[in-house]
Amino acid sequence: MIEFSHVSKVYGNVKALDDVSFTVEAGSITGFVGPNGAGKSTALRILVGLAHPTRGSATVLGRPYTELGCPGLQVGTLLDAGAQHPGRTGREVLTLGAMMLGLSKSRVDEILDLVGLTGGESRRTVGGYSLGMRQRLGVGHALLGRPRVLILDEPANGLDPQGIQWMRRLLRDLADLGCAVLLSTHLLHEVEQVADHIVMIGRGRVLARGTVDELSRGRSLEQTFLELTANADRSAA
């Protein structure tokens, strides 16, 4: 459903990504894990056509994202929860999205219920939303078209414990229905609770990939990751 094949990206003298390869299968959640600046956001931008790789390719459903017909009906994305007009209400944001995808207005009410935004909250302007509310709205916007693939960048930022539990259940339910979920985060504990597979990235390179059990080997995922990143830093030095 998602495939990165030997993707590298160079900005001037900086190599943001270095030969990144991994796949995300249908019906699974893949955690894309790394510290800030590791290259996660660059990889996702390349995946959805907002940046071009220096080398290699990234495809969704077997094709570059920009070649998909009406991609919003096939791929849901949340790359920046703050990228909504602050003067529009939450309902207006979703209504405009539904109109662009040719969906009925009833889908807006379904989404508001799904992401837990009340009628009163949906009539407030986005500029007055907390970060957690903007995350819920952004996830709802990504789900408007009932996508087969979901790409999320740090969706748990700003969520309270109840919101994090809701996010875990939602992603698990979507994966169980056959959706391929790519979840980028630096929160190792959270991804450990929900992901089927983990891809660890540091300094733009894939350090390890596998299931939580395969990567932890009796230790915490954080211990494994710290060891891998320390080795990567020594190699770079």
Image (tube, grey):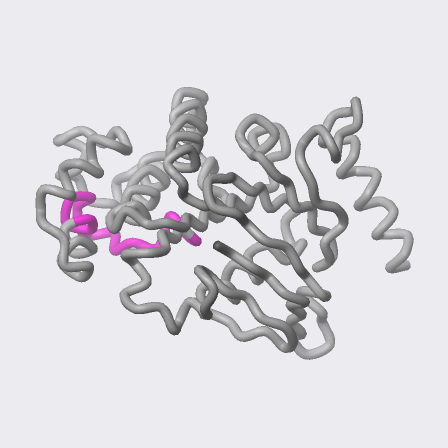
The residue at the far left in this view is 105
- The magenta region covers 79-94
Residue at image point 63% right, 55% down: 22
Residue 129 colored in magenta in the image:
no
Is 2 displayed left or right of 220 in the figure? Answer: left
Is 184 displayed left or right of 8 in the figure? Answer: left
Locate residue 126, reporting x and y percent: 24, 45
* Helix, strand or loop for the magenta stretch, by majority: loop
Q: Which quadrant of the figure contains the C terminus?
A: bottom right
Residue 85 colored in magenta in the image:
yes
In the rendered image of this protein, does residue 21 appear above or below residue 15?
Answer: above
Residue 189, by quadrant, is: top right
Is 115 displayed left or right of 209 in the figure? Answer: left
Locate residue 34, reporting x and y percent: 66, 46
Residue 212, by quadrant, is: top right
Q: Which of the two residues, 140 or 102, is positioned nearer the viewer here?
A: 102
Residue at image point 22% right, 38% down: 111
Q: Which of the two residues, 23 or 219, is positioned nearer the viewer here?
A: 23
Residue at image point 56% right, 30% down: 190
